């Protein structure tokens, strides 16, 4: 019986048909009941029953299923006419079936052919290869997205591959001017665990600054006790956006010893994991918030501010990390922590120098550094009043800024209005007195050098002034100082 087609490979209708025919011939095959008696009982031609028995003995139960004609479903139409209909259907812009049928009717009348029916044209159009239709109507880019084979990157451990991308959220939020605006979300996700390593919310369009701030948060240890993801990834996988392909990111990758990998331009399918997370954010997070944009519904009024949305998103991340992921079958947080020790920078200051992009030049005033309407102070600034410095800061945490003088780290200055700590007046007095003493000491040292130099100069001048007096005394003694010739 080798070589027979298995019964389960047939359709349900054909399987039922084969079983029904076997039930009819079973008394003859198994019990030896005369085939004429079987034919009389079921009122079937004897010739038909003999053919069924022969098919059963040669091919088993599958031989009892009715065979399909090779030309089944094919319309009896000249091949040239069929190809002409297919060519009209594949035109761009996509024509309707009715317009193709009208054109074919006119062509057939001109050529003296039998015109095809509307159902024939409809059937030919809907049997075209979907890939061919997509390529013809939507172009090569859409065809690649829908039908090209892709290589899906799979990480084998935590922090082996991080993916990053931006999305414009489907929610209206109040901006700083109490006007409705849609924020951008930058996400960095760990490929292996699906855990979120870092994010950044902003009303500004995606930029290198937003990427740097999200990566800074992703790499360093979190203040949130329920969020443990940190470290430096081996591979940073992104698209070809200018913020990802900048020279700054290349230098950061070299310094952090991580490799930058970019997806093919215009082909985001290789980054499906992060795209799927964006869909999850829309479905499971934003949809329950006021201001969510729903298709077909009136434009909602904004209620939340960006800081409130940020707090809500942080709470959602805690829930997301503790839920079982549908693909990995594990909690993202637990899967990330399995037998793993993250690689971290030597210090946060080193990471700040690499990633914090917000850098502005400022002059140090007697009352500190003025930035964005706030005042920042540190006792170290007492020695640099009126000097030009560069400040770097995290826009999400304006309580502290880092001050650099001639590309060297100077200090971390705080804003008393935003920070939890205050600079005591006694510390400021002590710092400015110390600075004044230092300047006085330096001034005294320079004055001493000048006085010493002038003292030596006065002695030399007195020695030079005694020479003319000696010459005058010589004249009085009758001695001539001029040489004379003999004939004079």
Image (tube, rainbow, N blue to C red):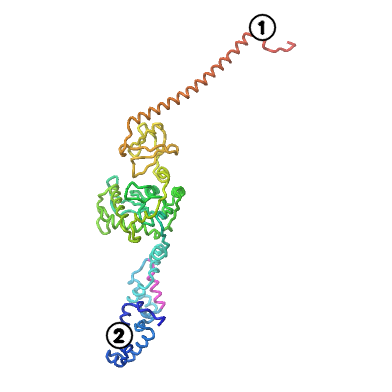
Query: Outermost residue, right direction?
Result: 487
Which residue lies at the image location 37% right of the left edge and 88% below the top edge?
54
Q: Is residue 171 magenta?
A: no
Which image quadrant for residue 160? bottom left
Q: Nearer the viewer, residue 141 or 83?
A: 141
For mark 2, what is the residue? 23
Question: Does residue 231 appear left or right of residue 288 in this picture?
Answer: right
**Which one is closest to the eye, mark 1 or mark 2?**
2
Residue 16: give its label. Answer: none
SS assignment at label 1: loop
Q: Position of residue 304 (x, y in %)?
A: 26, 49
Circle count? 2
Q: Is residue 80 magenta?
A: yes
Which residue lies at the image location 34% right of the left edge and 91% below the top edge?
47
Q: Nearer the viewer, residue 354 or 182?
A: 354
Q: Nearer the viewer, residue 337 or 365?
A: 337
Rounded to the nearest angstrom, the CA distance separating label 1 from label 2 is 166 Å
Q: Position of residue 291 (x, y in %)?
A: 26, 53
Neighbour tally class for label 1: few under 14, some 14-19, many 20 plus, Cα within 10 Å: few
Q: Position of residue 2 (x, y in %)?
A: 41, 81
For mark 1, what is the residue? 478
Q: Position of residue 321 (x, y in %)?
A: 32, 54
Boundaries of the magenta span: 79-92
Query: Outermost residue, top direction?
Result: 477
Figure check: 36 above or below 422: below
* Quadrant occupied by the N terminus: bottom left
Figure check: 147 above or below 439: below
Neighbour tally class for label 2: few under 14, some 14-19, many 20 plus, Cα within 10 Å: few
Residue contact at pointers 1 and 2, CB within 8 angstroms: no
SS assignment at label 2: helix
């Amino acid at each position: 019986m080798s070589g027979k087609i298995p019964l389960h490979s047939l359709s349900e209708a054909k399987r039922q048909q084969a079983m029904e025919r076997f039930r009819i011939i079973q008394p003859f095959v198994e019990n030896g009941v005369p085939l004429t008696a079987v034919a009389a009982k079921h009122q079937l031609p004897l010739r038909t029953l003999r053919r069924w028995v022969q098919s059963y003995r040669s091919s088993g139960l599958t031989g009892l299923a009715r065979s399909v004609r090779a030309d089944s479903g094919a319309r009896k139409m000249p091949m040239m006419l069929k190809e002409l209909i297919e060519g009209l259907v594949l035109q761009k812009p996509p024509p309707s079936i009715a317009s193709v049928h009208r054109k074919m009717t006119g062509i057939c009348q001109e050529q003296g052919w039998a015109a095809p029916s509307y159902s024939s044209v409809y059937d030919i159009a809907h049997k075209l290869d979907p890939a061919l239709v997509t390529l013809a109507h939507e172009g090569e880019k859409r065809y690649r997205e829908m039908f090209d084979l892709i290589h899906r990157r799979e990480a084998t451990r935590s922090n082996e591959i991080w993916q990053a991308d931006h999305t414009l959220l489907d929610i209206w939020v109040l901006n700083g001017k109490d006007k409705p605006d849609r924020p951008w979300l930058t996400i960095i996700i760990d490929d292996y665990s699906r855990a979120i390593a870092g994010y950044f919310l902003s009303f500004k369009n995606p930029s290198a600054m937003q990427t740097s701030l999200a990566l800074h948060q992703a790499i360093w240890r979190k203040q949130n006790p329920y969020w443990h993801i940190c470290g430096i990834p081996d591979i940073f996988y992104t698209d070809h956006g200018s913020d990802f392909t900048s020279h700054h990111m290349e230098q950061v990758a070299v310094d952090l010893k991580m490799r930058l990998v970019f997806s093919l331009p215009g082909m985001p399918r290789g980054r499906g994991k992060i795209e799927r997370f964006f869909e999850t954010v829309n479905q499971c997070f934003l949809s329950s918030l006021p201001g969510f944009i729903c298709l077909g519904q009136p434009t909602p009024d904004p209620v939340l501010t960006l800081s409130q949305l940020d707090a809500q998103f942080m709470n959602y991340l805690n829930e997301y990390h503790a839920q079982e992921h549908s693909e990995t079958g594990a909690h993202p947080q637990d899967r990330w922590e399995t037998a793993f020790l993250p690689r971290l920078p030597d210090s946060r200051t080193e990471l700040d120098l690499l990633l914090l992009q917000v850098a502005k030049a400022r002059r140090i005033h007697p009352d500190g550094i003025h930035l964005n309407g706030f005042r920042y102070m540190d006792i170290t600034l007492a020695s640099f009043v009126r000097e030009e410095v560069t400040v770097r800061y995290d826009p999400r945490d304006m309580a502290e800024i880092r001050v650099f003088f001639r590309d060297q780290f100077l200090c971390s200055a705080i804003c008393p209005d935003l920070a939890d700590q205050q600079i005591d007046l006694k510390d400021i007095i002590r710092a400015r007195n110390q600075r004044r003493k230092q300047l006085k000491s330096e001034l005294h040292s320079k004055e001493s050098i000048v006085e010493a130099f002038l003292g030596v100069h006065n002695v030399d001048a007195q020695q030079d002034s005694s020479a003319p007096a000696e010459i005058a005394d010589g004249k009085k003694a009758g001695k001539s100082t001029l040489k004379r010739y003999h004939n004079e």
